[in-house]
Amino acid sequence: MAIKFELLKEAKDSKARLGKLHTPHGVVETPIFMPVGTRGTVKAMTPEEVRDLGAQIILSNTYHLYLKPGHELIKEAGGLHKFMNWNGPILTDSGGFQVFSLGDLRKIKEEGVEFRSHIDGSTHFISPEKSIEIQNALGSDIMMSFDECTPYPASYEYSKESMERTTRWAKRCKDYHKNWDSQGLFGIVQGGMYKDLREKSAKDLVELDFPGYAVGGLSVGEPKELMCEILEHTTPFLPKNKPRYLMGVGTPDYLFEAVEKGIDMADCVLPTRIARNGTVLTSSGRLVIRNAKYSKDFSKLDSECSCYTCSNYSRAYIRHLFNVNEILGARLATIHNLHFLIDLMENIRKSIKEDRFMEYKSEFYEKYGYMDKI
């Protein structure tokens, strides 16, 4: 099997876990944050820079790579690792989230989903089998089963029907996938905001015996308290000896909450997206560098940060870059934000190892301004 998970330690003060995820392109220490390289690149960064920041695994997007440049071209290039010059592990999502985000541009059938490209309006069809075919061509270390991401809010009836379809699609994905020695495949738990549906989804997927499991359909607009409640209810139904992945979360508080509830992997476009808009993550909270008050601030973005940006450039200079639309501004902010979250997860792993995860969470929240959210 391409994917093997070692559970090294369980925290005494929470459900937090320390582990090692073995993949064909290297070992990943968990819990881990995965930078997102949607179209085969982490925006504004070279693969070498992403590696130098300490990123152990990145995520790429099946839907976008299928549309451009096409999975066949990437296969001809020798797979996504070679095409983008990244020699570490890669996880690809199934394309489901993007397809279901198209709204009126898609039609859901039992066979799969017919949709119109957001780029040129051309018609396409992705089935569970097609999603696996695309991901096989990309050659990712970890593939995701094709699922329906239930929107929020959604009725119980819709969520149940959607969840059951996702389970049927997961079985079709598993039956179609043949390259188990080179590519792992995760099942995705759905069920909306209904605990009994989440429980059934998890149990049914565990019966299918995937190498790992993701929790999807959270952080889609629901209140944070509800997300935490559903996640806490769901993770106990997933095997302890297999990795657990919470899809699409990347704010510091959501990462802490996910780890506390037993999650091993998380991803989000947040650090790179807000960086391009001039917002950076710091140990004392978010900072909007475009603001006029930083025009003569010659200190670094974060007094506690040792990243390349903070070691070499001031707030005033980075603000100047954004205000004159220089690309370097977005690059420097992106480097900092990715370093911040990668470093945060390293500190979280250290705190679990030292049996002080909840203590570290409290310390971080107090400094960051999250005390009212504990």
Image (tube, helix red, strand yellow):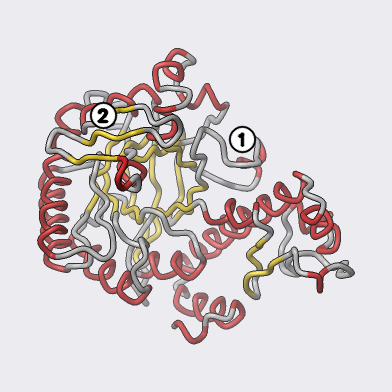
Of the residues shown, which amino acid type is indicated by label 2? Phe
Label 2 close to label 1 by CB (< 8 Å): no
Residue 247 image offset from top left, x and y in percent = 37, 53
Residue 242 image offset from top left, x and y in percent = 27, 50
Instruction: Establish if 146 lies above or below 71.
Output: below
The quarter of the image holding the C terminus is bottom left
Mark 2 or mark 1: name the one nearer the start of the chain.
Answer: 1
**Category of crowding for the residue at label 1, using alpha-carbon neighbours closer than 10 angstroms: few (below 14), some (14–19), many (at least 20):** many
Instruction: Establish if 196 lies above or below 202.
Output: below
Instruction: Establish if 121 lies above or below 158.
Output: above
Instruction: Establish if 206 lies above or below 199.
Output: above
**Category of crowding for the residue at label 2, using alpha-carbon neighbours closer than 10 angstroms: few (below 14), some (14–19), many (at least 20):** some
Who's the residue at 15% across and 38% down the image?
A: 109
Residue identifier under label 2: 125
Q: On residue 47, which mark appears?
A: 1
Q: On residue 248, which mark appears?
A: none
